[in-house]
Amino acid sequence: MKTKIKSGDLVYVTAGKDKGKTGKVLKLLKAQNRVIVEKVNVVKRHSKPSQQNQAGGIVEKELGIDLSNVMLIDPESNSPTRAGYKLSEKGKKVRISKKSGEEI
């Protein structure tokens, strides 16, 4: 599925238990149509001691959110916006904010 959201984008959560929060996209899971957003949808998982995590115990981690439940943040007004595409002067396709028309 084609998406206008990329890794590193600042997004606003529009639905779910974390509605109203903002965060940076850490990872895009295209096959599942989900995104992992920093400090959003955090759950606790119990882990056994291993080579990477020698202490084990309870670990907090972010789970994915459906792509339809996030919106890009407009760089100019810091409010949620839809994204579109436009050709730049150099002929390159760039993402723009539908609210302000500014490049994302």
Image: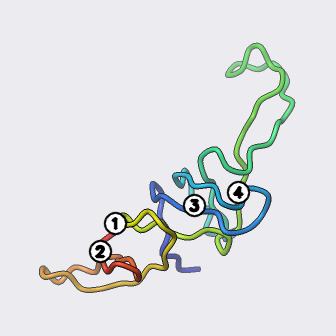
What's the mark number on residue 28? Answer: 3
Density class for disc 2 (Cα within 10 Å; few <14, some 14-19, many ≥20) is few
Disc sitting over residue 102 in the figure = 2
Q: Type of residue at label 3?
A: Leu
Between discs 3 and 1, the one toward the N terminus: 3
Q: For the residues carrying marks 2 and 4, which lies nearer the camera in this image? A: 2
**Nearer to me, 52 or 78:** 78
The outermost residue toward the left is: 90
The kind of residue tagged 2 is Glu
SS at circle 4: loop
The answer to the question of whether label 2 and label 3 lie on touching residues, with beta carbons closer than 8 A, is: no
Q: Is residue 75 above or below residue 87?
A: above
Question: What residue is shown with label 1?
Answer: 76
Looking at the image, tell me whether mark 4 or mark 1 is earlier in sequence order. Answer: 4
Q: Position of residue 25 (x, y in %)?
A: 54, 55
Q: Position of residue 49 (x, y in %)?
A: 81, 18
Q: Earlier in the sequence, mark 2 or mark 3?
A: 3
Apparent side of residue 28 relative to residue 50 in the rendered image (left or right)? left
Residue 58 shown left or right of residue 11 in the figure = right
Q: Secondary structure at mark 1?
A: loop
Residue at the top extreme, as displayed:
55
The residue labelled by disc 4 is 64
Residue type, mark 1 in image? Glu
